[in-house]
Amino acid sequence: MAVMLSIVEIMTGMNQNNLVYSTGTGRITQPKAQSEAPKGDGIIRIRRETKGRKGKGVTTISGFMGTQDEAKKLCTQLKKICGTGGALKNHVIEIQGDNRDKIKATLEKLGHTVKMAGG
């Protein structure tokens, strides 16, 4: 009886249609979920954070109302202007170091409403 239950559990776990390849159609790719831009008030907030980064300062830019591709392009542009590294995580742009003034000037030049947040 115990052997029968474990076989049933295995069979139900495998029946989730994780098909990778089919001889009729070839490789099957699963559609990736597009993350939508968070809804906000249209104001881009710039803040400096050190929490969880072992004391290293990072400038974060949140509130950007655009697609994921537009956010990636903006992140790349800001990294080039500041001359530092950075990343795009959960629709929040992170630029290494304290570059709030450069970033604010650049975003205002691009026509965005910018607000300095935090200390």
Image: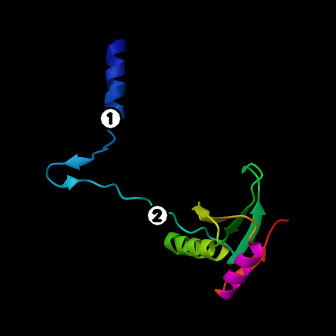
Residue 33: x and y in percent read 44, 59
31 in relation to 107, above or below: above
User: In the figure, is residue 101 to the left or right of 70?
Assistant: right
Residue 16: x and y in percent read 34, 41
Instruction: Provide the major secondary structure of the magenta segment.
Output: helix
Mark drawn on residue 34: 2
Q: Which residues are magenta?
A: 100-109
Toward which corner of the image does residue 110 lie, by quadrant? Answer: bottom right
Toward which corner of the image does residue 81 lie, by quadrant? Answer: bottom right
Q: Nearer the viewer, residue 83 or 100?
A: 83
The residue indicated by pointer 1 is: 14
Q: Residue visible at 82% across and 65% down?
A: 118
> In which quadrant is the N terminus drawn?
top left
Secondary structure found at label 1:
helix
User: Marks 1 and 2: CB-CB under 8 Å?
Assistant: no
Residue 19: x and y in percent read 27, 45
Q: Residue visible at 70% across and 85% down?
A: 108
Q: Residue visible at 70% across and 65% down?
A: 60
In the image, residue 104 lies in the stretch drawn in magenta: yes
Alpha carbons under labels 1 and 2: distance apart: 26 Å
Q: Residue furthest right?
A: 119
Mark 1 or mark 2: which comes first in sequence? 1
Secondary structure found at label 2:
loop
In the image, residue 61 lies in the stretch drawn in magenta: no
Residue 32: x and y in percent read 40, 58
22 in relation to 2, above or below: below
Amino acid under label 2?
Answer: Gln
Amino acid under label 1?
Answer: Met
* Number of numbered discs overlaid on the protein picture: 2
